[in-house]
Amino acid sequence: MKGLCECEIIAQSEISPGVVRTLLTGPEIANEAKPGQFVNVQVARTTTDPLLRRPFSVHAVYPDQGVYSLLYVMVGRGTALLNKIQPGDYVSVVGPLGRGFDLGDSPDAEHIVIAGGCGAAPLHFLCDDLCNKWGCEKVKVLTGGRSKNAVLCEAEFRSHGVDVAVSTDDGTYGHHGVVTELLQRYLDNDAQRTTHNAQRPFRIYSCGPHAMMREVARICAEAGVHDVQLSLENNMACGIGVCTGCVQKIKGPMKNDKSGQNWHYERVCKDGPVFNAEDIIWE
Amino acid sequence: MGIASPDLSVKIGKIEMKNPVTVASGTFGFGQEMADFYDLSRLGAIVVKGTSLDPWFGNPYPRTVETPSGMLNAIGLQNDGLESFLSEKLPFLRQFDVPVIVNVVGQSVEEYAEVAAALDKAEGVAGLELNLSCPNVKKGCMIFGSTPEGIAEVIRAVRKRTGLTLITKLSPNVTDIVSIAQAAVEAGSDALSLINTLLGTAIDPWKRKFRLANITGGLSGPAVKPVALRMVWQVASAVDVPIIGMGGIMNAMDAVEFMLAGADAIAVGTGNFVNPMAAVEIVTGIEEYLKATNISDVKKIVGAVN
């Protein structure tokens, strides 16, 4: 049975301007969470404004200590309120929630993780599990941001021992351009290295801005890479799958539908937030 | 000397509820997700999401937006339809010792009647809540529920097809909710539930765009509670059928207010989103209120505002 968890805030630190990492207690969450899952946090306990919980993907877990961390950009009232909570105080948390990343079952796969800005938050946790399951030599990280400050978690990614390539839109750090150009280049080089028959089975994982993930989906489709998992974001009201508010348009008919329409809505909070790129209808 | 264990049971039509707490349709899905949080048998009744004859796709997104002490939604009654309810959702709910009330939606009078007739034969359905008040669809629902004639036409058609307890869910988006409530009762509704959401909208001033794809949506949450409470009191004063009160109930004291205003039972809606345990905590809280005020039976507080 799931429940609400009272989590003590251990520390909050601004790791980059406007980007905060929060460490919380929560043995159940630290033990049960899978990469790509999220928690729904009540950022203000004594008021009904703001009313709704705020979803945050799990950034890292430390099951032995019973603690976990979140990483968030201060974008609005909810995140500002969360940031004001002092160490030693408790927040009400529901989770872990949603369907996370599938790490696959093929030992031959090469895993490419693509992060855009704060999209790095769940991917640090993912890299940890990928390295544990498949070995860090099988994992490559491409991470980008608008500027050097917006490239998050590079040190954490490197600490796993994985190969990391960085891009910035303004050229202040790493490749001057968007992170999807690194993906394009990597897949092109691989295609040159290998014959079509011997292409390595790639598994792609990505989280970041909508436009970036759409481009990841396009590049992978063109390169014939099919195992592409994207973690989507959407306005959530309940976060637990009961309100049907945070939907994404998905290919294929709705169950029992007789109208012939070839798409349907799925809930980002419950059926996702991780979806297969080939199932998504972009708009 | 306090009351050891007050009687919490209430009756809505033929539906025996072990306590006066149920949930608002559309805030609880069909129970599967909430069953991860607690034993659904702890509730007085469950009201499931709106169910139509054929599957409904729902509205484009964004479908929700937070507002001061509330939220707007324009889900558009997305649901898998009657067949899926009968074959998958109802068997799941039958495992629990709790009456299941099905919220029925339709685009036409015939659709309401047809869904009701099918549910009448289904094992494990305790009653029907006729959704004549959802503001987010272009056909049916609030269109019927906005006039005494419209609401009566649907209820009469449904009444002919089922002996199940009929609860009519009323919209607050009307000039005179009392005349509509009276029309519903005269047409054969066994009970009333109110309120559905208040029609509203929200605009992003920087993008100069509406925040909901549907433009308008239904307002719920603590922001609507005073309006809901007033309407429950007005309707309870005017009709003799049981009332399920709802609108911004977040805790047991909110629930008690609705009962004092005349609600025989109450429903938790948006409160489920903020606190998934809200409904069962409210059951406990009502019991504690009765003990603290030395009242042996929850029915004694219904309409007992001085």
Image: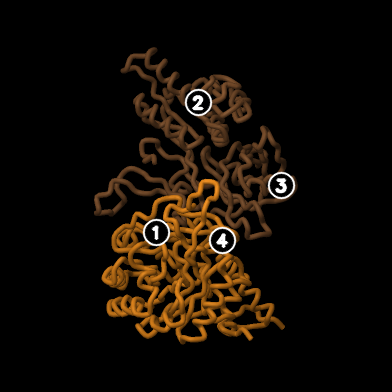
Chain colours: A brown, B orange
> What residue is shown with label 1?
B76
Q: Are marks 3 and 4 on the same chain?
A: no
Q: CA distance from mark 1 to mark 3?
A: 37 Å
Q: Earlier in the sequence, mark 3 or mark 2?
A: 3
> What residue is shown with label 4?
B70
| A279 vs B91: above or below | above
| B77 vs A33: above or below | below
Secondary structure of residue under mark 2: helix
- Dividing the picture into quadrants, the one containing residue B248 is bottom right
Quick check: can you spot residue A238? no
* Type of amino acid at the residue the image marks with label 3: Lys
The chain letter for the residue carrying disc 1 is: B
Q: Are marks 1 and 4 on the same chain?
A: yes
Quarter holding the N terminus of chain B is bottom right
* Type of amino acid at the residue the image marks with label 1: Gly
Question: Exactly how many numbered labels are in the figure?
Answer: 4
Secondary structure of residue under mark 1: loop
Q: CA distance from mark 3 to mark 4?
A: 22 Å
Q: CA distance from mark 1 to mark 4?
A: 18 Å
Tag 1–tag 3 contact (CB < 8 Å): no
Q: Position of residue A9 (x, y in %)?
A: 70, 45
Residue A168 placement, left or right of B217: right
Residue A160 placement, left or right of A251: right
- Dividing the picture into quadrants, the one containing residue A74 is top right
> What residue is shown with label 3?
A84
Secondary structure of residue under mark 3: helix
The chain letter for the residue carrying disc 4 is: B
Residue A179 is tagged as: 2
Quarter holding the C terminus of chain B is bottom right
Secondary structure of residue under mark 4: strand
